[in-house]
Amino acid sequence: MGSDEMVFKIKADFLKSLAHPTRLAIVEQLKDGERSVGQMVRALGLEQSGLSKHLSLLRQSGVLVSRQEKVTVYYSLRDRDIFKILRPIADILRRQLEESRRVLSRLGRA
């Protein structure tokens, strides 16, 4: 595999780690700071086993870091710059939605 291909694979793997609604919800939960697994279970309404799988994947991909204090595990974002990726995506989706609304409003007048 060439160096360009390797770079593209690394980027794709990172983006794949975010490509799940639950994992995006986890990232949003951590926007305001560190949370324990229990706090996220309650906030997201997930079972701990399912949440733990998503947290593990995000940690392995470098999105999250964890620390343990006695029996409680806390997670936080490794780098808040993750929102420099997510905000433009939200902006693009908002523009697409607005364009769809304009098209649909014209259909109603035809």
Image (tube, rainbow, N blue to C red):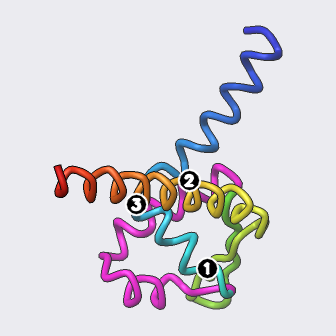
Q: Residues within 10 Å of mark 2 (few under 14, many from 20)?
A: few
Q: Residue at x 45, y 67 (%)?
A: 52
Looking at the image, residue 7 sits to the left or right of residue 54; the answer is right
**Of marks 2 and 3, which one's residue comes earlier in the chain?**
3
What number is the disc on residue 30?
1
Q: How far from the left and from the top, in percent, is residue 11? A: 69, 35
Residue 23 screen position, x and y as percent: 48, 62
Please identify the quarter of the rendering in which residue 69 is found.
bottom right
User: Which residue lies at the image location 57% right of the left edge and 70% below the top edge?
Assistant: 27
Which image quarter: residue 9? top right
Circle 3: residue type:
Pro
- Identified by mark 2, the residue type is Ile
Residue 45 magenta-highlighted: yes
What residue lies at 58% left-to-right and 60% top-to-bottom? 91
Q: Nearer the viewer, residue 57 or 89?
A: 89
**Residue at 62% over, 82% down:** 74
Question: SS for tag 2?
Answer: helix
Query: Circle 2 is placed at which residue position?
Result: 92
**Range drawn in magenta:** 33-62
Q: Amino acid at mark 1?
A: Leu
Tell me which label, 2 or 1, sits earlier in the chain: 1
